[in-house]
Amino acid sequence: MHTQYFTYALEVEKTGSITQAAENLFMSQPTLSKAIKDLEGSLGFAVFKRSSRGVVPTRKGEEFLQHAKKIVAQIERMEFALQTQDTSHQMFSLAIPRVSYIAQAAAQYVRELDDGRDMEIDILEGSSMRIIDAVAQGRSVLGILRYHAKDEDYFMRCLSEKGLQMEHFWQGDLLVLMNKDHPQAQKELLDAQDLKELVEINSGDEEVPYIRTSEAEAPSARRILVYDRAMQLDMLQTIPDSYSRASAQPEEVLSKYGLVQRRCRQRVEFKDVLIFRAGYRFSKLDRAFIDLLCLQRNAVAYGD
């Protein structure tokens, strides 16, 4: 049984309304209703009933909610203790997309930790769906999710259903990343025709589940699917007539791999959001990473 459902049920009891509870929890009303039904199905009895006073607990529901309050309070005390205690052990977990500025921020963050103290750092790099699952299941405390702006409704529903909250972090256009020696690299602004004969290099696991194959955009006639950020950069460096769609890259990455980034008339807008479990309070280590991430984002987005 998911203990996050306990929090949902307690909010419903507090407000006496599914609609108000959903608003307070940053969820849709249908999603919260389904979560309560799932909880009741697991328990084997109804927790709430409708009355003239709104949604109120049943007799068995009142007993369950008393236990739920104690469990949630214990979890909150434990999380607070882990976040505020000043011990010699530095713990941090993060799930990130295959994006260079984020990877650099993570590496810089680890480098700046106190090497005189014990540390346990867990950094997962993967697809959007894997990042969501890692944070929802508790493997990663924080996650950074990247998605195409046109897919926002899907991902917002997915986060809500998983009991996750988010904060918008960056929004922009994907650029064309390519070898500096290719003739097309001399143009400051590209269009679809310029890319038609090139080899497209994409992540192989970034499909959005709700899109059927028949609805997806037609893939390039020449493409390579990879599952590793370093492999993608190596391919761009090694295969001169290849390209990828990517957000702005750190200058050191462009220099190291002999790449340039160009704008394209056919815009593809992306969004980066920070995700975490509902009700989670950032620790000092979390905030230190977020501050460093902002600096890295500013460096690639604005040249600061």
Image (spheres, rainbow, N blue to C red):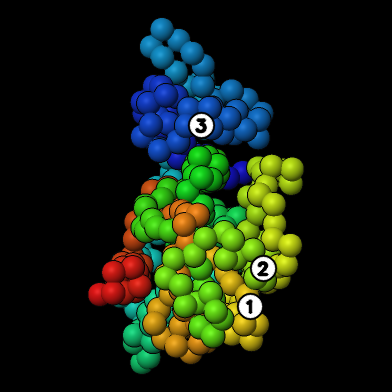
> Between tags 1 and 3, which lies in front?
1
Q: Amino acid at mark 2?
A: Glu
Mark 1 in CB contact with mark 2 (< 8 angstroms): yes
- Dot 2: within a 10 Å radius of its alpha carbon, few (fewer than 14), some, or many (20 or more) residues? few
Q: Which residue is mark 2?
A: 197
Q: Answer with left or right where residue 289 lies relative to residue 225.
A: left
Distance (Cα) linking label 1 and label 2: 8 Å
Q: Which residue is mark 1?
A: 241
Name above or below for residue 150 compared with residue 92: above
Distance (Cα) linking label 1 and label 3: 49 Å
Would you say residue 215 is visible in this rendering? yes
Residue at 51 percent of width and 45 percent of height: 150
Residue 197, picture quadrant: bottom right
Q: Give me the disc on residue 32.
A: 3
Residue at 39 percent of width and 58 percent of height: 172
Name above or below for residue 157 compared with residue 289: above
Q: Element under label 3?
A: helix
Estimate the x, y position of residue 109 in percent, counting from the top left. Answer: 37, 79
Question: Which is more N-terminal, label 2 or label 3?
Answer: 3
